[in-house]
C-alpha cells in the first residue's frame, strides 16, 4: 500500500472521528439535526456529483435509482441510530462499539446470505472485537446514569446499520458499477427528501434548531462525505483488507476526543479496548 494511500485513509479516519465528536454537541431534536446536515451535505456534494451525469459517465438509470434509494434508507437508519445513541450515552462507548460491530455483522451476513466461508483468522478477529467491546464498556451491569449495557445496545444497533449499508454500497459500486461520488450524492439527496416530511411536522422548531446547531451541522456536512469519499477513492486502488482496518483507527482518536472534550472517564481502559477492537477488525480484514 503506497504511502499516499495510507495518508489518504488516515485523513479519512480523522475526518470520521471529528464529525462523530462534533455531532455529540448537538442540542434539540435529533430528526431536525440529521435532516439539516443531510440537506447541507447534499448541496455541497451536488456540484461535483452531477458532473458524471452531465458527461454521460453515470446515466440516471433504474439501477442507479434503486441503488440510491436502498442506500438512502440504510444511511438514514444509521444516522438516526447513531445520533440517538450519542444523545443518551458516552461517545467513548457508542462510537467504538458501532465501528466494531459493523465489520463483525458484515462478516456474519456474508456467511449467512452469500455463502462465504471465513478463515480461522477472521473468526478469531470477531471474537477479539467482542472482547474489545467488553473492555470498552467495563461492567455492563453496573447501575448509575451511564448504563453501559444500553450504550452498547445503541452502538450495536448502529453497527447493524453500518453492516447493512456497507454490504449494499459495496454491491452498488462493484457489481452495478455506479460512480461512487454520484451515487453518494444521490444517497444524500434522497435521504434528505425522505426526512423532509418529518422535519416539516416540526417546522416551528426548524429555525431554532438550525441556529443552535449551525456549526455542528456544517462540520458534519463537510467531514461526513469527505471521510466516505476518501475511503471509496482509496478502495479503488488499494486492497480493501488494508483500507478497512486502517480506516477504523478512528475509534482510538474518537476515544481520546471523548475524554478530552467531554471529560468521559476510564480513558486507559477505553483506549485499550479500542485498540483490541481495532486488532479484531484487522484480523477480520485479513
Image (cartoon, rainbow, N blue to C red):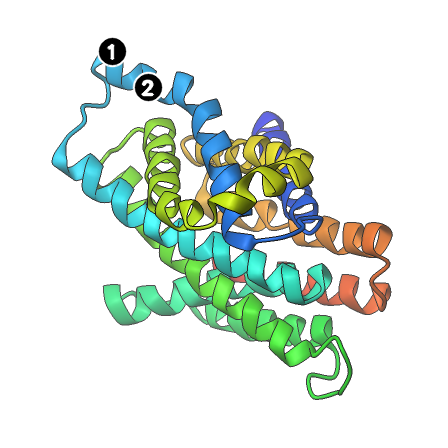
- Quote the CA–CA distance across marks 2 and 1: 9 Å
Front residue (pair 123, 110): 110
Front residue (pair 182, 40): 40
Q: Answer left or right for 112 relative to 218.
A: left
Front residue (pair 84, 258): 84
> Which label belongs to residue 50?
2
Q: Specify the farthest residue to the front.
A: 204
In which quadrant is the N terminus drawn?
Answer: top right
Q: Mark 1 Cα within 10 Å, few/some/many (few <14, many 20+)?
A: few
Q: Residue at x 49, y 63 (%)?
A: 159
x, y percentage for residue 41? 49, 31
Of callouts 2 and 1, which one flags the residue occurring earlier in the amino acid sequence? 2
State the image quarter where residue 189 is shown: top left
Q: Specify the farthest residue to the top.
A: 55
Res. 286 in view: no
Res. 255 in view: yes
Which residue is under mark 1? 55
Q: Residue at x 60, y 43 (%)?
A: 209
Q: Mark 2 Cα within 10 Å, few/some/many (few <14, many 20+)?
A: some
> Which label belongs to residue 7?
none
| Disc nearest the viewer among 2 and 1 | 2
- Secondary structure type for disc 2: loop
Q: Residue at x 70, y 88 (%)?
A: 141
Q: Residue at x 50, y 34 (%)?
A: 225
Whether tag 2 and tag 1 are in contact, CB under 8 A, the answer is no
x, y percentage for residue 164? 37, 58
Amino acid at each position: 500500500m503506497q504511502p499516499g494511500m495510507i495518508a489518504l485513509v488516515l485523513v479519512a479516519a480523522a475526518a470520521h472521528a471529528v464529525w462523530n465528536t462534533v455531532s455529540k454537541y448537538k442540542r434539540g431534536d435529533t430528526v431536525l439535526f440529521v435532516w439539516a446536515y443531510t440537506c447541507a451535505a447534499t448541496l455541497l456534494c451536488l456540484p461535483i456529483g452531477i458532473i458524471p451525469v452531465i458527461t454521460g459517465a453515470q446515466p440516471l438509470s433504474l439501477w442507479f435509482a434503486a441503488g440510491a434509494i436502498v442506500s438512502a434508507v440504510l444511511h438514514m437508519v444509521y444516522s438516526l441510530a447513531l445520533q440517538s445513541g450519542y444523545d443518551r450515552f458516552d461517545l467513548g462507548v457508542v462510537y467504538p462499539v458501532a465501528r466494531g460491530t459493523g465489520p463483525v455483522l458484515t462478516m456474519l451476513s456474508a456467511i449467512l446470505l452469500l455463502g462465504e466461508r471465513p478463515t480461522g483468522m477472521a473468526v478469531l478477529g470477531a471474537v477479539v472485537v467482542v472482547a474489545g467491546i467488553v473492555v470498552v464498556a467495563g461492567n455492563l451491569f453496573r447501575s448509575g446514569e451511564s448504563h453501559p449495557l444500553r450504550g452498547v445496545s445503541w452502538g450495536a444497533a448502529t453497527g447493524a446499520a453500518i453492516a447493512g449499508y456497507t454490504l449494499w454500497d459495496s454491491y452498488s459500486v462493484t457489481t452495478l458499477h455506479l460512480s461512487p461520488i454520484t451515487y453518494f450524492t444521490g444517497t444524500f439527496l434522497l435521504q434528505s427528501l425522505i426526512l423532509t416530511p418529518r422535519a416539516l411536522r416540526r417546522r416551528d422548531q426548524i429555525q431554532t434548531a438550525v441556529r443552535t446547531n449551525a456549526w455542528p451541522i456544517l462540520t458534519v456536512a463537510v467531514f461526513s462525505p469527505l471521510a466516505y469519499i476518501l475511503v471509496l477513492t482509496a478502495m479503488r486502488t488499494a486492497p480493501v483488507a488494508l483500507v478497512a482496518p486502517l480506516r477504523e483507527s478512528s475509534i482510538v482518536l474518537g476515544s481520546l476526543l471523548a475524554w478530552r472534550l467531554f471529560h468521559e472517564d476510564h480513558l486507559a481502559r477505553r483506549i485499550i479496548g479500542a485498540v483490541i477492537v481495532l486488532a479484531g477488525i484487522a484480523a477480520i480484514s485479513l
